[in-house]
Image: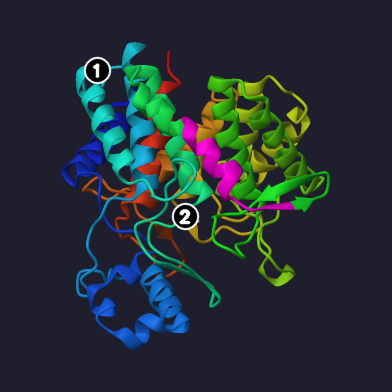
Amino acid sequence: MNPLFEGAFEKLRSYCESQDFGGWDPYDGLNSKVFQALPYFKRSAFCRLVVIQGFKRSPVNLRRIAFVPKEHNAKGIALFLSGYCNLYHALQKGIRLDISQDDCLEKIHYLASLLLSLKSEGYSGACWGYNFDWQARRIFLFPKNTPTVVATSFAVSALCGAYEITHEKAYLEEALSAADFVTNDLHRTECGSGFLFSYSPLPGNDTVFNASLLGSKILSICYRYTKNEEYRLLAAKTIEACCEAQNKDGSWIYGMLPVQAWIDSFHTGYNLEALQTFQDLTGDHSFEENISRGFDFYISNFFLDDGIPKYYHNRMYPIDIHCPGQLFVVLSKLNKFNEWEELAENVMNWTLENMQDKKGYFYYQIKPRFSAKISYMRWSNAFMFNAISCYLDRWD
């Protein structure tokens, strides 16, 4: 392994461990103690939206002066947990790292317990949300810890990975109970030959393709352990609706209205990961052509030959850290590292050279003029930690 690459990863690991895997988030502006002390502004959807977007878009980190605390985020902790599971497997293969298997095992138990402590309470099964209030446009507020199918899917995957290594039944039992959250608490909307899941259990919440596919991913994982046919059938019907919405070129369009519609890199990667998970864990190859077509679009439209990752299929900026990060997860899940090794190496080298700070953390976004080089634990560091661990685990 390239010593420079190994050194970059160790700097990231050291940084994240020094922060106890907690930190700021692009969307945590409403956690500001200053904002929370202003009742009028707290009640205004417009003010909440302005604060969130202002903190998110500012190239200057406003969180210290606004007293936004560093906190643990469930999705971030799940990504770290998955990453340490991958490192454990890499060490088993003989990859040399500055961490032992025993240390990895200790981190796996610590992070799994921490993840369980972050569960959202009061639902049919285990589920997870975010550690901040989030205003979605001006019409919808997600209160802190409102569970989402997105955060829950990352938690389920991570806990099952931890179970496979530790054989701790509590990890598996909690993960499997998430199927009840999906089937009982999420709303379903008929769409074509199938249906879509809502993003969260809140009334009136949108149904979207990406969230629905992550719901099918949860059900596929739970089917693997339980062989419950209801889970497999529900996952298949959801995937059918999402694949009917796939464009002929293999892409998926996101957004609720034509003026808001876009095609982006990492959501396409999420979709491919979920589809491949369903195929691998159920043995159902009905959607193999959709995976192939989607991957061809993904790999051909979101990465330049020199390794620059694009956010959108038709323009480059902003370059978001999720875009290179998700590539390594997709190549790992679809078993395509050997086929695209040169591109993967170019993307990794470009990302390390342009988006990693000398302190070890990764930047949020690169823009033509004012880049956001703030350290975000969930969005940037946890995401890249898991991504690089996938890159390491691919070597035999």
Q: If the image is split into quadrants, where does the C terminus sit?
A: top left
**Disc nearest the viewer among 1 and 2:** 1
Q: Is residue 285 left or right of residue 52?
A: right
What secondary structure is found at the residue carrying circle 1? Answer: helix
The secondary structure that dominates the magenta segment is helix
What secondary structure is found at the residue carrying circle 2? Answer: strand
Q: Is residue 69 left or right of residue 123?
A: left
State yes or no: residue 19 in magenta: no
Q: Nearest the camera: 262 or 79? A: 79
Picture residue at 28% right of the left edge, 77% below the top: 36
Which residue position is annotated with label 1? 101
**Residue 351 at x, y percent in the picture:** 41, 45
**Do tag 1 and tag 2 residues touch (Cβ < 8 Å)?**
no
Q: Nearest the camera: 374 or 204? A: 204
Q: Is residue 12 left or right of residue 219?
A: left
Q: Which amino acid, mark 2?
A: Asp
Q: Nearest the camera: 199 or 310? A: 199
Task: Magenta stretch: give its range.
Answer: 176-189
Which residue position is annotated with label 2? 320
Measured in 3D between alpha carbons, the distance from the residue under mark 1 to the one under mark 2, in whole angstroms, is: 32 Å
Picture residue at 44% right of the left edge, 32% below the top: 175
Q: Is residue 335 visible?
A: no
Q: Which amino acid, mark 1?
A: Gln
Picture layout, residue 1 above or below residue 263: above
Residue 236, quarter of the rendered image = top right
Q: Is residue 347 left or right of residue 34?
A: right
Q: Is residue 227 visible?
A: yes
Picture residue at 24% right of the left edge, 81% below the top: 37
Residue 2, quarter of the rendered image = top left
**Residue 347 at x, y percent in the picture:** 48, 40
